[in-house]
Image (tube, grey):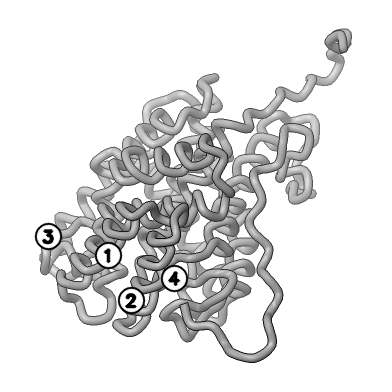
Amino acid sequence: MRMLTGARRPRPAEPQPPPGPGTDPAACSADPAADPADPGAATADRLAAAMVYGLTAEAVTWPKPGLVTAVSPGCHRDMDVYTLLRSSATLQPHFRTAVVFGLRRGAAAPAARDFAELRDAGRRAEHSMLTTTGGTNTHRGALFLGMLLCCAAGIEHAAGRPLEAEAVCRTAQEVGRDALRADLAAAATGPSSVGLRAYAVHGLPGVRGEVLRGWPSLLGHGLPTLRTALGAGRPLREAIADTVLALMTVVEDTTVLNRGFALERLDTTRRQASAALAAGGTATRRGRRLVGRMARRLEQRQISPGGSADLAAMAVALHTWQTRPETPAPRKGDRRAPAPA
C-alpha cells in the first residue's frame, strides 16, 4: 500500500461489529412510510439495513489488494471510499423492496416471474446507483447478489424459518436458477456484459455460476473464514480482510478479467492470496507483508477483485442476519406481561 510521506494522517476508523439487539441498525434508517404496526415492515427495514451494513463494512476494511478501502482507492481512479458509502446508502430502499417482495411471495415455490420482477427492481436500483455516483459502477455485482439474498430472506421469514445462511442461499438459488441458466445459454450468441463474455470466451460462469452452484465460495470459504476469525476474537476489520483474501483464492471473479481478459490475471490473484493466507493473513507480520506486496502488484496491473469484495459483503450481511435475530414486535392489543427481570 502506498503511503504519503510527511505529516502522519489520522488512523481511519475500523468497522464496528453489528449493533446488538437493543440497537438494531434498522432503527436508524427505517422507512418513514412503513406502518410501525406491521411486523413485516420492521423485518424489511432490519434486513435491508443489515445488507447495507455489509456493503459499508466491506468498503472501509483494509488491507484489500487492488480494492477501494478507507486508506486507498486501490487500482481505481473513478471512485474512493466515499463513493462506495454514498452508493451503499442509495441501495437501501431497493434492498428493502426485495425483502418485501419475498415476504409477499411467502412460502410458495419461486416461479420464473419472480426473478423477472426482481430483475426489473434491480434495474431501477442500478439506475439510482449510477445517478448517485455520476455513472460509476460501484456495486453492480453486490446489487445483484444482495437483491437475491434479500428476496430469499423475505421468503424464509414468511415461511417462519430462521435465517440460516445455507437456507437463505438455497432459496436464492431457486429464485434465480431458470433465468440465470438462460443467461448463460444465450451468452454464446452475443454476450452483453463482462461476465457473459467471460463465459463465452473462457467458460467461466462468474457470479451467475456462484448462485447456480449453491454459493460454494460464500458458504464454503467466505462465511467460514469470517466466523472463525470473529470466534477467535479477531477485530472485525481483520476478519473481513481475511474473508476477502479467502474468497480471492476460489472465486471465478470476472472483474479481474475486466482489463486484459487473460486467465493469467485470475491465476495470479488466486496464487498471491493463497500465499498471504498460508502465512497467516492479517494476523501475522509475514502475512501482512505479503498482502502489502500483493496490493502493489495488483495496482500495477490494474487488477481489482471486485467479485470477492461483493461476496465478502454478503458474508457480513448473512452473519448479521443469523446472529442478530429480531425480537417479534408485540401485536396491537397484545397485553402479555413483560418477562421477569
Distance from label 3 to label 1 (Cα)? Answer: 23 Å
Residue 54 percent location from the top left of the image: 55, 51
Please name the residue that numbered disc 2 is placed on. Answer: 298
> Upstream in the sequence, badge 3 or badge 2?
3
Q: Check the image and report above or below for 85 versus 316.
A: below
Label 2 neighbourhood size at 10 Å, few (<14), some (14-19), many (20+)?
many
> Upstream in the sequence, badge 2 or badge 1?
1
Q: Nearer the viewer, mark 4 or mark 1?
A: 1
Mark 2, secondary structure of its residue: helix
Distance from label 3 to label 4 (Cα)? Answer: 25 Å
Please name the residue that numbered disc 3 is placed on. Answer: 203
Q: Check the image and report above or below for 54 versus 202.
A: above
**Amino acid type indicated by mark 1:** Gln
**Amino acid type indicated by mark 3:** Gly
Residue 153 seen: yes
Q: Nearer the viewer, mark 4 or mark 2?
A: 2
Label 1 neighbourhood size at 10 Å, few (<14), some (14-19), many (20+)?
many
Rendered residue at 71%/75% (across/down): 10
Residue 34 percent location from the top left of the image: 75, 42
Mark 1, secondary structure of its residue: helix
**Amino acid type indicated by mark 2:** Leu
Residue nearer the viewer, 222 or 136: 222
Q: Residue 120 has which mark?
A: none
Label 3 neighbourhood size at 10 Å, few (<14), some (14-19), many (20+)?
few
Q: Is residue 295 left or right of residue 216?
A: right
Mark 3, secondary structure of its residue: loop
Residue nearer the viewer, 185 or 310: 310
Please name the residue that numbered disc 1 is placed on. Answer: 272
Mark 4, secondary structure of its residue: loop
Please name the residue that numbered disc 4 is placed on. Answer: 67
Residue 144 seen: no
Residue 112 percent location from the top left of the image: 32, 41
